[in-house]
Structure formats: C-alpha cells, structure tokens
C-alpha cells in the first residue's frame, strides 16, 4: 500500500550564539567577557551549545557560524534595535543563522529583573521604594531615536513594577544629559546604567556626570552585568524555540 509520509518534525534548535558589539580598539577583553557570559548561559540550557562573540573581533562571528552544527539562535547583546542590530548584524550573518531574538535592552524580562535589583538595593539601605529617585543612565544617540526609545520603554515598564518617588532618564549622547537627570535627586537615589557591559561610558562618562551633578545616591552596576542575566538570556532562548502547540479547530454542531 502506498501513501504519503508525514514530514518528520523539525529538529529542535540546540545552537545559540550571543553577539555583542565589542571594542574595536581592544577587542580581546570584551571577546573573553562575551564567551564567559555564554558559558554561564549554557549552564541553564542543558544539551545546548552556547557561544559568545563580538562584532569587533575580526573573524570571530564567521568562525562561530562555520563551526555551528546547525543555524544558531542569535541573542544580540545590545541595548536597542539600532543600526547594529537592524542593519549590520543581519549583513554579517548573511542568512547563516536561525532565529534572531530581541536584543537585551528589549527583552521583556529585563524590567522585572531590574525592579527586583532596585528593590533589593533600596531595602539594603533602609530606603522605602516610594521615597526613591531612580536615574537611568543610557547611551542615547544623536543620529537615531531607537536608543532613546528603547531606554524610555524600559523605564516605563520598570515604573509599573515598583513604586518610586521619581524616575528620570539621562543620556551620554543626547539631551537630557545624565548630569541634568541626576541633579537634585536627593540622598535616596539610585543610578542604574542601562548598558550591556562595564566598560567605556560606564567607567568614565556616567561617574563624571553624576559627580558634576552632585549626585548623593548609589551607583548600581550596569544592568547587563547583573548576576541573573545569564538565566534570563537562557530562558529567552528556550522560550523562543519551544514549538507552538497546534490549534485544534473548535467543533460546531
């Protein structure tokens, strides 16, 4: 008897690649940091091969794609959907990857993680959240509105999750500046850098801006370096690769 064989189910994805910007002037340390992050993410994804590369390290992305057993899921370690994620990353991937997920800054789980961090940090100092001024320090851009839009969207989502006296957003590359946002924040204040790594602007521009503003509060680590980030990224990768349940048509009499 002949018949039509049902197509075999598509094999589940088991390759993931975390792609960060890196640092063209000194690509080695960021490349190592991204690889270390990928190793921590892999701890939450049994059976997966998770690697991390930066766009700044010559040949790293091409080598990772060539070594993958199948088209890898891509997790962009960027804070917005700007030029790098919308244009440069797709160009560099050149159709050799699988699903490209939302970047870190747009991950829907990020505001919840940040809300817990802010609440814990405030509680450790005996500050009621309702007395707290939160200053989000971000990169921004003088050429595109995507970076600021992603930051403000994050801020709005965060504000719905934790009661605050005030929430302010300031930028390195556009107005309002971080110094303007931090001015007069008072002693019950936390500055949260909306950055993926502890480099460059986080080490120099953010502290300088806070100092010039006479900021009296607490400077947190950049949200992208939070200890819970690896688990959050792993869950985003896992959730994106879970096959959708088939919808059974309702039966009408």
Image: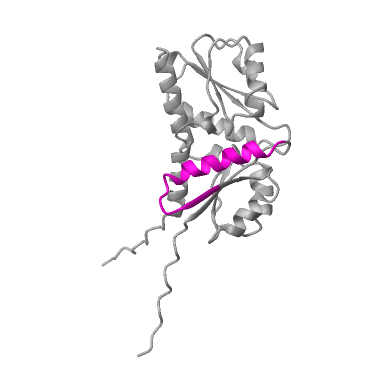
What residue lies at 47% left-to-right and 48% top-to-bottom? 237
Q: Position of residue 116 (x, y in %)?
A: 42, 27
Instruction: Based on the picture, tell me whether residue 130 belongs to the magenta stretch.
Output: no
What residue lies at 59% left-to-right and 40% top-to-bottom? 32
Rendered position, 159 above or below 124: below
Residue stretch rendered in magenta on the structure: 26-51
Toward the viewer: 92 or 85? 92
Rendered image coloring scheme: one colour
Determine whether, in the image, residue 43 is placed left or right of residue 185.
left
What residue lies at 61% left-to-right and 12% top-to-bottom? 183
Toward the viewer: 248 or 227? 227
Task: Give the total of numbered labels.
Answer: 0
Toward the viewer: 242 or 17? 17
Instruction: Based on the picture, tell me whether residue 30 belongs to the magenta stretch.
Output: yes
- Residue 95 in sight here: yes
Task: Identify the image quadrant of residue 130.
Answer: top left
Q: Quadrant of the N terminus?
A: bottom left
Q: Quadrant of the C terminus?
A: bottom left
- Residue 163 in sight here: no
Residue found farthest to the bottom: 1
What residue lies at 61% left-to-right and 46% top-to-bottom? 53
Q: Position of residue 200 (x, y in %)?
A: 67, 28
Q: Position of residue 219 (x, y in %)?
A: 54, 18
Q: Position of residue 211 (x, y in %)?
A: 64, 12
């Amino acid at each position: 008897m002949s018949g039509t064989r049902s197509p075999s189910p598509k094999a589940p994805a088991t390759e993931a690649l975390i792609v960060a910007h890196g640092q063209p002037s000194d690509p080695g340390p960021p490349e190592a940091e991204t690889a270390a992050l990928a190793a921590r993410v892999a701890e939450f994804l049994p059976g997966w091969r998770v690697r991390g590369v930066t766009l700044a390290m010559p040949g790293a992305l091409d080598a990772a794609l060539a070594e993958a057993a199948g088209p890898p899921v891509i997790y962009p370690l960027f804070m917005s959907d700007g030029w790098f994620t919308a244009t440069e990353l797709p160009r560099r991937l050149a159709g050799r990857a699988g699903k490209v997920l939302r970047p870190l800054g747009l991950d829907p789980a990020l505001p919840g993680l940040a809300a817990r961090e802010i609440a814990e940090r405030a509680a450790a100092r005996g500050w009621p959240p309702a007395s707290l001024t939160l200053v989000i320090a971000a990169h921004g851009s003088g050429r595109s509105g995507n970076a600021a839009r992603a930051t403000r969207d994050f801020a709005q989502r965060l504000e719905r999750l934790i009661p605050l006296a005030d929430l302010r957003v300031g930028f390195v590359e556009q107005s309002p500046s971080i110094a303007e946002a931090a001015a007069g924040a008072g002693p019950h204040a936390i500055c949260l850098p909306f950055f993926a790594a502890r480099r460059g602007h986080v080490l120099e521009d953010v502290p300088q801006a806070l100092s010039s503003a006479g900021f009296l509060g607490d400077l947190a680590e950049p949200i992208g370096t939070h200890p819970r980030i690896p688990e959050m990224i792993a869950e985003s990768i896992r959730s994106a690769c879970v096959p959708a349940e088939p919808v059974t048509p309702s039966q009408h009499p």
